[in-house]
Image (tube, rainbow, N blue to C red):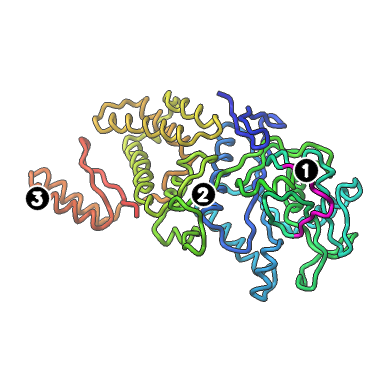
Amino acid sequence: MSLKFYNSFSRKKEFFKPIIDGKVGLYTCGPTVYDFAHIGNFRTFIFEDLLKRWLIHTGYDVTHIMNITDVDDKTIKMAKDQNVDLNIITQGYTEQFMNDLMWLKILPADKYPRATKSIDKMIEIIKKLIDKGHAYIESDGSVYFNISTFSDYGKLTRISIKGQTKSDRIYDDDYDKNSPQDFALWKGWKKEDGKIGWDAPWGKGRPGWHIECSAMSSENLGNHFDIHCGGVDNMFPHHENEIAQSICSSGEKFVNYWLHSEFLLVDGGKMSKSLGNCFTVSDLEKKGFTAESIRYQLLAGHYRTKISFSLEKKQESDKVISRINEFQSLLIDLGAQDIQRKELPNSYYDFVEAMNDDLNTPKALGIFHSWMRQVFKKIKTDSIGEREIGEAWNFLTNFDMVFGFLSAKTFKIPLEIKKLMEIRDAARAENNWTLADDLRDQIQEKGWAVEDTTKGQKVKKLLN
């Protein structure tokens, strides 16, 4: 099956055809760095990581741009509330975000452009919109986009602008999702903005949030590119406004495929700081979560469905990750990594078909786990040959390139554990099962698990 994505703009699945054969331009809305990113944000970022990994796996050369919003209403308010310079606020949260990305094994973007570094491009786009009659200047130096001049406004989100008038305009970056209004491209300087402002032909001020992404995407990917991603909460007004201002300024098509991930629930309900369930990556790390366990919870459900993250599911997701890592260890014990074969099992091609169908991760993971259980049985009964071992290693390697579930850590067996295993081996040889069981318990208390196989004792590190 050829690769298909559900295009939010057309509301249907479409076969993916890049603008340039073999290459993909991918833009993903990054964080607004006024606070720590939470698990709901990372639901979207990990979906985008999966998308990118799959595009690379299928042979595409991906150019990935993720913006950093370091000036907007929220960042300015935070700087004002804390009485510090804007860049002190944004730099600290940007660094933490980058650390979180690395810890979660999210592949880095090719570029992370910052809004404050693209002001000239924003001014250039706004000037074009004014000259073409799509924007107007107000007496305070603010510039607004006139949505009535763009006949396709509202097509992404199916919102009608019927009855909207020029006097209906909005200054804030976020606003009522049921109220399409002329939106601010440029916000005239006000006393409360303090030192934050840039000179423009129509007066000093700062950009609106929506123009920032149009500038940063076109600077790095051109006016027309392949894929734009984000969460469903970005569709309106942000992405709707991006489409309007980008097309009207350049006169070209903007994006071919729009992909959006659904909301993340926590324990079946909405996230809220007041409820104490708005977890950051650091919060979850302190609770003993591994990056792989988080990735599993966020990828086990389809990206276009609401899924529920839960602390109570940690044991379940840890168990799945442990099983996959145990599978890798067994294959390593069989010398799988040294088998020079390129074959893949039939199940791999079923896995590919599921992933090509709009990244159907529930089906793809089901195929992988079913296949893994079958191979486990053959390994346990010593009924697996070299070809199947090689196939299994190749499938597992490809699987991990896409999902990132294998633990990054490689554990060296401590000398103390090795000595206990030697004593236990001797006890088993003498049929001293009481001592053997006692030694098993001692080893487990030290964080290791022993398994008796037809080829002797196998030991593995217990994951927290």
User: 384 and 53: which one is in front?
Assistant: 53
| Vertical side of 377 occupied by 134: above or below | below
Residue 275, image x and y in percent? 47, 62
Q: Mark 3: give few (<14), some (14-19) or many (20+) Cα within 10 Å.
A: few
- Residue type marked 2: Leu
- SS label for mark 3: helix
- Residues in magenta? 160-171
Q: How far apart are marks 1 and 3 (CA)?
A: 82 Å
Which numbered dot is residue 434?
A: 3
Q: Mark 2: give few (<14), some (14-19) or many (20+) Cα within 10 Å.
A: many
Q: Mark 2 points at which residue?
A: 264
| Magenta region includes residue 165 | yes
- SS label for mark 1: loop
- Residue type marked 1: Lys
Please identify the quarter of the rendering in which residue 143 is found. bottom right
Residue 131, image x and y in percent? 91, 48
* The C terminus, quarter of image: bottom left
User: Seen in the image, is 199 located left or right of residue 194?
Assistant: right
Q: How far apart are marks 2 and 3 (CA)?
A: 49 Å
Residue 243, image x and y in percent? 75, 43
Q: How far apart are marks 1 and 2 (CA)?
A: 33 Å
Residue farthest to the bottom, as pictured: 83
Q: Which residue is drawn at 52% across and 41% down?
A: 305
User: 336 and 4: which one is in front?
Assistant: 4
Q: Earlier in the sequence, mark 1 or mark 3?
A: 1
Q: Name the residue under label 1.
A: 162
| Vertical side of 442 occupied by 354: above or below | above
User: Seen in the image, is 305 located left or right of residue 200?
Assistant: left
